[in-house]
Image (cartoon, rainbow, N blue to C red):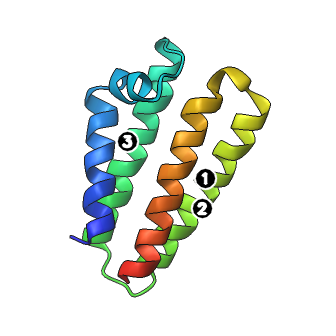
Amino acid sequence: MRRPDAARLALGVVALARPGLPVRVTGARDGAGVRRVVRVLGARYVVQSLGGRWVHRAWVPEADAAVDVVHALSMLGLAGLAPRHRRLALVSAAAASAFAVADLRDR
């Protein structure tokens, strides 16, 4: 498993199993809706990380990076539009950006 996928899998499992943890760590506002969104993001990270194991193609790191860049941009938009979720959105954007860079460096 590529290192970015292992990190993505770890974050995804944490977000699925303990969605309150990322919320607390970032100091963001908590709530049932926020935890649902964190779980959905965790599920995407798990699926994305495992997808690289099943599809062995040269373009997978670039595709992973593209997905994470789109996610980071959407979180930046959310941070601007929803101030009450700004902190969690910015942390999510930073994580997605780091995964995108790691994917491109690890290919």
Residue 79, above or below 107: above
Residue 47's x, y, as percent?
A: 35, 53
Name of the residue lying farthest toward the top: 31
Toward which corner of the image does residue 41 lie, by quadrant? Answer: top left
Report helix, strand or loop for mark 3.
helix
Q: Quadrant of the N terminus?
A: bottom left
Residue 73 in the image: above or below residue 77: below
The three-letter code of the residue at mark 2 reads Val
**Which residue is tagged 1?**
72
Quarter-wise, where is residue 84 in the image? top right
Q: Nearer the viewer, residue 100 or 24?
A: 24
- 5 vs 61: above or below: above
Residue located 49% across and 14% down the image: 30
In x, y percent, where is residue 13?
A: 26, 40
Q: To which residue does mark 2 refer?
A: 69
Disc 1 packing (10 Å; few <14; some 14–19; many ≥20):
many
Which sits earlier in the primary sequence, circle 1 or circle 3? Answer: 3
> At numbered mark 1, what does the secondary structure look like: helix, strand or loop?
helix
- For disc 3, the marked residue is 43
Give the distance between the C-alpha atoms of the residues marked 2 and 3, in whole angstroms: 17 Å
The answer to which quarter of the image holds residue 70 is bottom right
Amino acid on which disc 3 is placed? Ala
Q: CA distance from mark 2 to mark 1?
A: 5 Å
Q: Are circles 2 and 3 on residues that touch, CB within 8 Å?
A: no
Characterize the local packing of mark 3: few (<14), some (14-19) or many (20 or more) Cα atoms within 10 angstroms.
Answer: some
Q: Residue at x 25, y 29 (%)?
A: 17
Q: Position of residue 107 (x, y in %)?
A: 38, 84
